[in-house]
Amino acid sequence: MSECIQLSFAVCRIGIYTCFRALCCKGPPPPRPEYDLVCIGLTGSGKTSLLSQLCSESPENIVSTTGFSIKAVPFQNAILNVKELGGADNIRKYWSRYYQGSQGVIFVLDSASSEDDLETARNELHSALQHPQLCTLPFLILANHQDKPAARSVQENILRIFEVTRENYRRSQAEILISKCNPFFSSEFCCWLAVF
Protein backbone atom coordinates (compact mmCIF):
# COMPACT_ATOMS: atom_id res chain seq x y z
CA MET A 1 0.00 0.00 0.00
CA SER A 2 2.79 2.42 0.86
CA GLU A 3 4.33 1.74 -2.54
CA CYS A 4 1.07 2.80 -4.20
CA ILE A 5 1.01 6.00 -2.17
CA GLN A 6 4.65 6.74 -3.01
CA LEU A 7 3.97 6.06 -6.70
CA SER A 8 0.91 8.35 -6.59
CA PHE A 9 2.96 11.13 -4.99
CA ALA A 10 5.71 10.71 -7.62
CA VAL A 11 3.18 10.95 -10.45
CA CYS A 12 1.61 14.04 -8.84
CA ARG A 13 5.05 15.67 -8.42
CA ILE A 14 5.86 15.02 -12.07
CA GLY A 15 2.51 16.43 -13.13
CA ILE A 16 2.87 19.54 -10.96
CA TYR A 17 6.45 20.07 -12.16
CA THR A 18 5.35 19.75 -15.81
CA CYS A 19 2.50 22.23 -15.31
CA PHE A 20 4.79 24.65 -13.48
CA ARG A 21 7.35 24.50 -16.27
CA ALA A 22 4.71 24.99 -18.94
CA LEU A 23 3.25 28.03 -17.18
CA CYS A 24 6.29 29.75 -15.74
CA CYS A 25 9.32 28.83 -17.78
CA LYS A 26 8.30 29.76 -21.31
CA GLY A 27 10.63 32.71 -21.67
CA PRO A 28 9.78 36.00 -23.32
CA PRO A 29 7.76 36.04 -26.51
CA PRO A 30 9.77 36.65 -29.66
CA PRO A 31 10.23 40.36 -30.37
CA ARG A 32 7.94 41.95 -32.94
CA PRO A 33 9.75 43.37 -35.93
CA GLU A 34 10.02 47.15 -36.07
CA TYR A 35 9.65 49.20 -39.25
CA ASP A 36 10.49 52.85 -39.81
CA LEU A 37 7.90 54.74 -41.83
CA VAL A 38 7.56 58.35 -42.87
CA CYS A 39 4.11 59.98 -42.90
CA ILE A 40 3.71 63.00 -45.16
CA GLY A 41 0.87 65.17 -46.42
CA LEU A 42 -0.27 68.78 -46.48
CA THR A 43 -1.28 70.64 -43.32
CA GLY A 44 -4.78 69.70 -42.20
CA SER A 45 -4.86 66.38 -44.04
CA GLY A 46 -5.26 64.47 -40.76
CA LYS A 47 -1.84 62.89 -40.22
CA THR A 48 -1.71 63.62 -36.49
CA SER A 49 -5.32 62.52 -35.93
CA LEU A 50 -4.70 59.30 -37.83
CA LEU A 51 -1.62 58.41 -35.81
CA SER A 52 -3.35 59.32 -32.56
CA GLN A 53 -6.21 56.99 -33.50
CA LEU A 54 -3.79 54.16 -34.32
CA CYS A 55 -2.02 54.69 -30.98
CA SER A 56 -5.38 54.72 -29.13
CA GLU A 57 -4.73 58.23 -27.87
CA SER A 58 -7.40 60.75 -26.99
CA PRO A 59 -8.54 62.82 -29.98
CA GLU A 60 -8.79 65.91 -27.80
CA ASN A 61 -6.22 68.69 -28.01
CA ILE A 62 -4.70 67.57 -31.31
CA VAL A 63 -2.66 70.33 -32.95
CA SER A 64 -0.93 70.38 -36.32
CA THR A 65 2.62 69.13 -36.30
CA THR A 66 5.29 71.77 -36.65
CA GLY A 67 8.53 70.16 -37.77
CA PHE A 68 8.16 66.45 -37.06
CA SER A 69 7.06 63.97 -34.43
CA ILE A 70 7.76 60.29 -33.96
CA LYS A 71 5.19 57.79 -32.71
CA ALA A 72 5.50 54.08 -32.09
CA VAL A 73 2.35 52.42 -33.43
CA PRO A 74 1.93 48.90 -32.02
CA PHE A 75 0.21 46.21 -34.05
CA GLN A 76 -0.11 42.55 -33.24
CA ASN A 77 2.51 41.51 -35.80
CA ALA A 78 4.83 44.55 -35.83
CA ILE A 79 5.72 47.92 -34.35
CA LEU A 80 5.78 50.91 -36.65
CA ASN A 81 8.03 53.83 -35.81
CA VAL A 82 6.31 56.59 -37.76
CA LYS A 83 8.01 59.92 -38.44
CA GLU A 84 5.21 62.35 -39.07
CA LEU A 85 6.44 65.39 -40.99
CA GLY A 86 4.61 68.71 -40.84
CA GLY A 87 2.86 69.73 -44.04
CA ALA A 88 3.19 73.53 -43.99
CA ASP A 89 4.71 75.29 -47.01
CA ASN A 90 7.86 76.26 -45.15
CA ILE A 91 8.40 72.69 -43.85
CA ARG A 92 7.74 70.62 -46.99
CA LYS A 93 11.04 71.65 -48.54
CA TYR A 94 12.80 69.80 -45.69
CA TRP A 95 10.89 66.52 -46.04
CA SER A 96 13.65 64.82 -48.00
CA ARG A 97 16.04 65.20 -45.06
CA TYR A 98 13.91 62.76 -43.08
CA TYR A 99 13.51 60.08 -45.77
CA GLN A 100 16.74 58.22 -45.04
CA GLY A 101 16.22 54.88 -43.34
CA SER A 102 12.50 54.75 -44.10
CA GLN A 103 11.01 51.39 -45.04
CA GLY A 104 7.65 52.67 -46.21
CA VAL A 105 5.69 55.85 -46.86
CA ILE A 106 2.22 56.93 -45.78
CA PHE A 107 0.84 59.85 -47.77
CA VAL A 108 -2.31 61.35 -46.23
CA LEU A 109 -4.50 63.69 -48.24
CA ASP A 110 -7.65 65.60 -47.46
CA SER A 111 -10.17 64.25 -49.95
CA ALA A 112 -12.49 67.18 -49.22
CA SER A 113 -9.93 69.93 -49.83
CA SER A 114 -10.02 72.59 -52.54
CA GLU A 115 -8.85 71.95 -56.10
CA ASP A 116 -5.73 74.07 -55.44
CA ASP A 117 -4.82 72.04 -52.35
CA LEU A 118 -5.40 68.78 -54.23
CA GLU A 119 -3.10 70.00 -56.99
CA THR A 120 -0.43 70.86 -54.42
CA ALA A 121 -0.87 67.46 -52.78
CA ARG A 122 -0.62 65.76 -56.18
CA ASN A 123 2.64 67.55 -56.93
CA GLU A 124 4.08 66.62 -53.52
CA LEU A 125 3.00 63.01 -53.93
CA HIS A 126 4.58 62.69 -57.38
CA SER A 127 7.76 64.31 -56.07
CA ALA A 128 7.89 61.78 -53.22
CA LEU A 129 7.15 58.82 -55.52
CA GLN A 130 10.13 59.81 -57.67
CA HIS A 131 12.56 60.62 -54.84
CA PRO A 132 15.63 58.32 -54.97
CA GLN A 133 15.31 57.28 -51.33
CA LEU A 134 11.60 56.48 -51.63
CA CYS A 135 11.17 55.24 -55.19
CA THR A 136 11.46 51.56 -54.25
CA LEU A 137 9.45 51.69 -51.02
CA PRO A 138 5.83 50.67 -50.45
CA PHE A 139 3.42 53.61 -50.51
CA LEU A 140 0.12 53.85 -48.68
CA ILE A 141 -1.99 56.74 -49.95
CA LEU A 142 -4.87 57.57 -47.62
CA ALA A 143 -7.85 59.66 -48.68
CA ASN A 144 -8.85 61.12 -45.33
CA HIS A 145 -11.96 63.10 -44.35
CA GLN A 146 -14.31 60.81 -46.29
CA ASP A 147 -17.08 61.77 -43.87
CA LYS A 148 -17.23 65.35 -45.18
CA PRO A 149 -19.86 66.27 -47.80
CA ALA A 150 -17.28 67.57 -50.29
CA ALA A 151 -15.13 64.42 -50.09
CA ARG A 152 -14.10 62.88 -53.37
CA SER A 153 -14.39 59.12 -53.73
CA VAL A 154 -11.20 57.12 -53.95
CA GLN A 155 -12.05 55.05 -57.01
CA GLU A 156 -13.44 57.78 -59.22
CA ASN A 157 -11.81 61.07 -58.38
CA ILE A 158 -8.68 60.51 -56.30
CA LEU A 159 -7.18 58.00 -58.74
CA ARG A 160 -7.99 60.25 -61.69
CA ILE A 161 -6.74 63.47 -60.07
CA PHE A 162 -3.54 61.96 -58.75
CA GLU A 163 -2.79 59.83 -61.81
CA VAL A 164 -1.15 57.26 -59.60
CA THR A 165 -0.75 53.90 -61.24
CA ARG A 166 1.74 51.17 -60.62
CA GLU A 167 2.78 51.37 -64.24
CA ASN A 168 3.72 55.07 -63.93
CA TYR A 169 6.24 54.29 -61.22
CA ARG A 170 7.30 50.75 -62.16
CA ARG A 171 6.14 49.31 -58.86
CA SER A 172 4.92 45.84 -58.08
CA GLN A 173 1.20 45.35 -57.57
CA ALA A 174 1.39 45.30 -53.76
CA GLU A 175 3.48 48.41 -53.29
CA ILE A 176 0.88 51.14 -53.78
CA LEU A 177 -2.33 50.95 -51.79
CA ILE A 178 -4.87 53.71 -52.08
CA SER A 179 -7.45 53.60 -49.34
CA LYS A 180 -9.87 55.73 -47.42
CA CYS A 181 -9.89 56.16 -43.67
CA ASN A 182 -12.90 54.41 -42.20
CA PRO A 183 -13.70 52.12 -39.24
CA PHE A 184 -12.08 49.21 -41.12
CA PHE A 185 -8.90 51.13 -41.86
CA SER A 186 -6.80 49.27 -39.28
CA SER A 187 -7.37 45.93 -41.01
CA GLU A 188 -6.44 47.43 -44.40
CA PHE A 189 -3.37 48.95 -42.80
CA CYS A 190 -2.33 45.55 -41.43
CA CYS A 191 -2.77 44.03 -44.90
CA TRP A 192 -0.55 46.75 -46.32
CA LEU A 193 2.07 45.81 -43.72
CA ALA A 194 2.29 42.41 -45.37
CA VAL A 195 4.33 43.93 -48.20
CA PHE A 196 7.19 44.41 -45.78
Image (cartoon, grey):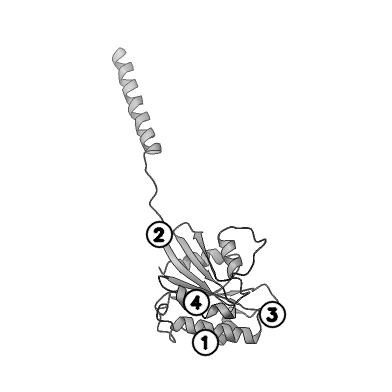
The 10 Å Cα crowd at callout 4, few under 14, some 14 to 19, many 20 or more, is some
- Pick the residue in front: 93 or 146: 93
Residue 58 x %, y %: 64, 58
Q: State the residue position of label 4.
A: 95
Residue 151 x %, y %: 66, 78
- Pick the residue in front: 162 or 131: 131
Please, which residue is most extreme toward the top here?
A: 1
Q: Nearer the viewer, mark 4 or mark 1?
A: 4
Residue at 65% x, 61% y: name it: 59
Q: Is residue 150 above or below residue 5?
A: below
Indicate the amino acid at tag 2. Answer: Pro
Say left or right for 13 vs 121.
left
Q: Nearer the viewer, mark 2 or mark 4?
A: 4
Q: Earlier in the sequence, mark 2 or mark 4?
A: 2
Residue at 31% x, 23% y: name it: 10
Question: In which quadrant of the rendered image does the C terminus lie?
Answer: bottom left
Residue at 55% x, 84% y: name it: 122
Mark 2–mark 4 Cα distance, whole angstroms, equals: 25 Å
Indicate the amino acid at tag 4. Answer: Trp
Q: State the residue position of label 2.
A: 33
Residue at 39% x, 46% y: name it: 28
Say left or right for 168 vs 144.
left
Q: State the residue position of label 3.
A: 150
The 10 Å Cα crowd at callout 1, few under 14, some 14 to 19, many 20 or more, is few
Q: Secondary structure at mark 1?
A: loop
Q: Earlier in the sequence, mark 3 or mark 4?
A: 4
Say left or right for 18 vs 81.
left
Indicate the amino acid at tag 1. Answer: Glu
- Marks 2/1 in contact by CB < 8 Å: the verdict is no
Q: State the residue position of label 1.
A: 163
